[in-house]
Image: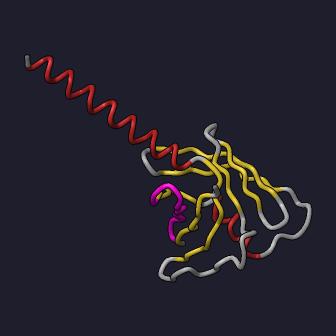
Amino acid sequence: MKKLFGLVAAFVLITSCEKDELSVADNFYGDWRVLYLNPAGLFKNNVYPDDSSPRITFNPDGSLLLRLSANSCGGDYVISDVNKLNVAMIYCTEICCDDDFSLQVANLCRQASSFEINGQNSLELHIKGWGIIKLERIE
């Protein structure tokens, strides 16, 4: 009886952990619009002036697309643990000149080390020693 209880408890633990990780990843994937940059200690600093703010797409295959004011960037990311993030190899086209906000977003995305999902439509990318990039899901 103890063995049966132990097996059932292990099964419940394993399946519940997989489900939590899957829901975190499912909520992470998709298209996001940058709302603002928030250096540590400040509130909603560097708000983009309109709806044409930079956009980030996180694909399930580990690739990302970053659309700036003039150029597009691509790269890869890895989610480890529940909320750890490693962004690698961001490369950008150089068609024209991006605005300062877009350049700052591209630079900070390379440094993102973790994330936090707030509901289904709000995402924060955390940059260690700097602050956050606040994003909202694009429907």
Q: Residue furthest front?
A: 139
> Start and end of the magenta stretch?
118-129
Image position of 53 (left or right of 124): right
Judge by depth and name the residue closer to the eye, 15 or 109.
15
Quarter holding residue 92: bottom right
Judge by depth and name the residue closer to the eye, 68 or 85.
68
In the image, what residue occupies the spot 59% across and 64% down? 135
Whether the magenta-drawn stretch holds residue 121 is answered as yes
In the image, what residue occupies the spot 32% across and 36% down? 16
Judge by depth and name the residue closer to the eye, 85 or 30.
30
Image position, residue 93 (x, y; %): 86, 56
Image position of 1 (left or right of 61): left
Q: Quadrant of the C terminus?
A: bottom right
Total of numbered circles in the picture? 0
Image position, residue 8 (x, y; %): 20, 23
- Asked if 48 appears above or below 137 in the picture, the reply is below
In the image, what residue occupies the spot 51% across and 48% down? 27
Q: Residue furthest right?
A: 95
Image position, residue 133 (x, y; %): 58, 67
Image position of 14 (left or right of 24): left
- Asked if 67 appears above or below 37 in the picture, the reply is above
